[in-house]
Image (spheres, rainbow, N blue to C red):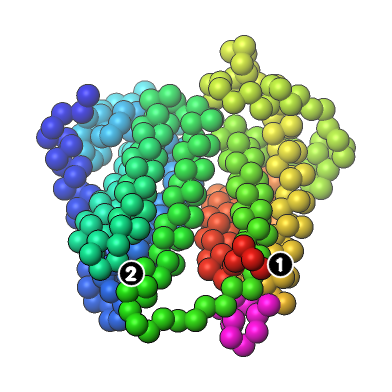
């Protein structure tokens, strides 16, 4: 159990980190503090996801092998002796000074998001008489989700990067991003004013929801590829090991509860299982392109002068799909370069944001 001093030090760090975006909010004109905070949370969560990918891709997930601190300290400065001893024993191991800092900065960013959501809850509570209970209940739900996300962050360390835990940790972060975006775009304060903006909703909510569902499955498959280090299991493109349908072992590849690098029997996972994981992600990408392309094309059709923003997000959607194709191929052709891998994860998060934003113009009654 972490001691009280450690928790207080980490809380102080979270407050300091949270103060930076709050300082930005205080200097911006227009809109309420509540509305600006909601959008800052979206931005911070996106940054957290990208930095989390950087942490994973640089093998820094165990840079501090305990949780929530680093060798019982709130920062690597205070744990420098332990870190250097571990680095001396294993120079290419999971613990180095640089990796410790990367891991702890990731945790600081996560604590910052948590602290800002606590502030969001406080503001929503203060506005209950003005805005009703909807914003408060929504914010409390977000707080619960970020606490669950924190638990998976701890298990990521204590269970030594078990693939399903790391994958769910990423998926929960994307769900948090989606819900924060949905929350931020709600016209909470417009409902309390006599002047309301007429919003056209010509886009099909069914299509938007289906596109988001398909995208989340693909992101799960991509995360499963990354957390199992199966990116290079198919070293060529567009084939896999020279064939259209390589040797597959679906049960071994998609047994979810197992240790990193091992199968369900505790033996080293086979190359065929890793090929299966990789190839499933590639094949499902074709469906993603069809479904999200349909959403983008339909949105462009509906993008009248009164719906310029919808047209802008449709173009962004196509741009992000192109980015995903280019970076996905680059990961294979150029042997998983850090920049391409990082952009691939960032593009996935941006696609989630984009589709949720497009739901602003969607209705269940639209065809």
User: Which residue is found at the position 66% from the left and 27% from the top?
Assistant: 254
Q: Is residue 105 visible?
A: no
Q: Nearer the viewer, mark 1 or mark 2?
A: 1
Secondary element at tag 1: loop
Q: Is residue 258 left or right of residue 68?
A: right
Q: Which mark is residue 367?
A: 1
At which x and y percent is residue 147? 33, 40
At which x and y percent is residue 251? 71, 22
User: Which residue is found at the position 64% from the left and 73% from the top?
Assistant: 202
The quarter of the rendered structure image containing the N terminus is top left
Relative depth, front residue between 1 and 270: 1
Relative depth, front residue between 237 and 206: 206
User: Which residue is found at the position 20% from the left and 34% from the top?
Assistant: 73
Relative depth, front residue between 169 and 299: 299
> Is 308 included in the stretch rendered in magenta?
yes
Q: Is residue 266 left or right of residue 77?
A: right
User: Pointer 1: residues within 10 angstroms few (<14), some, or many (20+)?
Assistant: few
Above or below 83: residue 31? below
Residue position marked by numbered label 2 in the rendering: 35
Please give the range of residues in magenta: 302-311
Q: Is residue 346 left or right of residue 319?
A: left
At which x and y percent is residue 214? 66, 49
């Amino acid at each position: 159990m972490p001691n009280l001093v450690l928790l207080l030090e980490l809380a102080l760090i979270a407050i300091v980190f949270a103060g930076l975006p709050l300082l930005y909010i205080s200097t911006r004109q227009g809109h309420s503090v509540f509305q600006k905070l909601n959008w800052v949370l979206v931005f911070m969560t996106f940054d957290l996801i990208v930095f989390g990918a950087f942490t994973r891709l640089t093998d820094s997930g165990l840079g501090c092998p305990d949780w929530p601190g680093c060798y019982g300290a709130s920062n690597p400065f205070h744990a420098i002796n332990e870190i250097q001893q571990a680095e001396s024993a294993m120079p290419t191991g999971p613990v180095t000074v640089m990796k410790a800092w990367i891991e702890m900065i990731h945790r600081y960013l996560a604590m910052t998001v948590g602290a800002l959501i606590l502030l969001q809850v406080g503001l929503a509570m203060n506005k209950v008489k003005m805005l009703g209970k909807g914003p408060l209940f929504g914010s409390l739900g977000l707080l619960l989700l970020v606490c669950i996300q924190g638990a998976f962050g701890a298990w990521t360390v204590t269970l030594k990067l078990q693939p399903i835990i790391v994958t769910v940790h990423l998926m929960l972060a994307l769900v948090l991003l989606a819900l924060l975006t949905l929350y931020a775009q709600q016209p909470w304060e417009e409902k309390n004013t006599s002047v309301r903006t007429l919003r056209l909703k010509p886009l099909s909510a069914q299509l938007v929801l289906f596109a988001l569902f398909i995208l989340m499955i693909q992101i799960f498959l991509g995360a499963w590829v990354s957390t199992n280090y199966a990116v290079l299991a198919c070293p060529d493109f567009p084939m896999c090991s020279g064939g259209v349908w390589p040797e597959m072992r679906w049960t071994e590849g998609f047994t979810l509860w197992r240790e990193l690098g091992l199968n369900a029997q505790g033996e080293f996972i086979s190359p065929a299982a890793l090929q299966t994981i990789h190839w499933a992600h590639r094949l499902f990408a074709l469906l993603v392109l069809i479904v999200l392309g349909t959403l983008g094309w339909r949105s462009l059709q509906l993008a009248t002068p009164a719906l310029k923003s919808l047209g802008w997000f449709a173009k962004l959607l196509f741009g992000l799909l192109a980015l995903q194709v280019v970076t996905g191929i680059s990961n294979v052709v150029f042997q998983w370069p850090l920049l391409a891998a990082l952009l691939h994860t960032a593009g996935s998060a941006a696609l989630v944001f984009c589709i949720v934003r497009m739901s602003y113009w969607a209705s269940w009654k639209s065809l």
